[in-house]
Amino acid sequence: MLEFGTDGVRGRANSELSVEFALRLGQSVAKTVSGSTFVVGRDTRASGSMLQAAFAAGLCSRGASVLDVGVIPSPGVAYLCSRLGLPGAVISASHNPYFDNGIKILGPAGTKLSPEAEAAIEAGIPSGDGDGGGDEAVGTITDSRHLAEDYFLYLAGIELVGRLDGMKVVVDTGNGAASGFARRVYAEYGARVVVINDTPDGTNINLNAGSTHMEAVIAAVREERADLGLAFDGDADRVLAVDEKGAVVDGDFIMAILAEFLEARGLLANRAIAVTVMSNLGLRLALEERGIGVIQTDVGDRNVFEAMRSHGLSLGGEQSGHIILSDLAWTGDGMLTGLVLAGAVRAAGLPASLLAGTAMQRLPQVLTNVPCVGDASSVMEAAPVAEAIGRTREALGEQGRVLVRPSGTEPVIRVMVEARDEGRARSLADAIASAIESLS
């Protein structure tokens, strides 16, 4: 049986994530999550409508009703949940290939459920197809695709962005859930918009497109001589940017730019931001020079969210481009973040490359994924690996950083080393990787 990971349940559609499992999951959610009506949307995968139908049927068989909002970015479902005060779900596997899919459950505030709530859902999944609640306990499914317009109107009215007249912006929707939304949203602010990878066919989501394949947006920015490029993942909760020269502006640079932008307007709550351990050391050093604090969390947007909530922060995120602007939304929203970033570039009156270059300087960072057979924790605690990590930390001192952790989604151990010299970072990372490989 599939279990909840860092971003809902996820697996190969129609095999690991089967119709039967989606049905049973829906039944357990209806029993476990408080609410008689659920907002349910999906991305553009071919399996999305099938799995949404099964999940919605499970909800209805236990008396809950469903507002089917159709194809819509994940943050759009989160927005509607928050506005309507209803729980919800998104059928999406985010940046994964089309043949994967997933189901994310959201609470009535539009945020992810707690690990305890997810564990309760897992425990309540029927072992078979599951029984319904009887003739009197049947919910309904209502075609509510019109609610997507409410999400558009919300994005079109963010005062912080200002006007983007005269800016030329390339937007890569990755043939995902932002298809059909992004052009309208950015044009609403006066930008000249060039949209690429905006023709989903069910199998081309994230295919050589979007935030996991930046080559297309880089080429388009250069060809169009655009001021900025923005690339979303399949469900549009992440964004990576490209400056006018075609250089990638990742989540760390975006957060550095937005921190300064918000701070200048008195909107950076508690003068600090939350980042994960994967953020580049250069981000922390740049912010500390400006008197802005950095709260560091484990990997995962849920951890960023919790740190922001507990410390009262208005900005946080991940290097991957999952950015939370909590005064505007309590979830990552790629289109929203891209709008505010474009507004920051326009307000600065500088090319995006110069703005990013003055916001922070990246320390060379080497990331290696080492295949791991067996228990990753045991491998990491083994003497050869522990000693290699210790030697690396001693060698780097305060001039770098090492992070070794098991992946939450793949059978690999991720080795990350930062140093002021890339060659040194690579050799140190290779030494740790070799120690791990010696145990395979």
Image (tube, grey):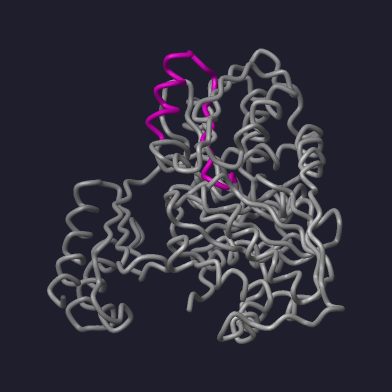
Residue range of the region highlighted in magenta in the rendering: 214-236
Q: In screen coordinates, is 352 left or right of 161?
A: left
- Look at 47% across and 31% down and name the residue there: 357
Against 42, residue 15 (above or below) is below
Q: In screen coordinates, is 176 left or right of 160?
A: left
Question: Residue 417: where, in percent of width, then height?
Answer: 30, 58
Q: Nearer the viewer, residue 170 or 397?
A: 170
Q: In screen coordinates, is 353 left or right of 29?
A: left
Question: Residue 236: where, in percent of width, then height?
Answer: 59, 44
Residue found at the far left of this picture = 438
Q: Nearer the viewer, residue 184 or 380?
A: 184
Against 416, residue 354 (above or below) is above
Residue found at the far front of this picture = 135
Quadrant in which residue 246 is drawn = top left
Does 218 lie within the magenta span? yes
- Look at 85% across and 53% down and name the residue there: 83
Which quadrant does the C terminus fall into? bottom left
Against 187, residue 130 (above or below) is below
Against 301, residue 242 (above or below) is above
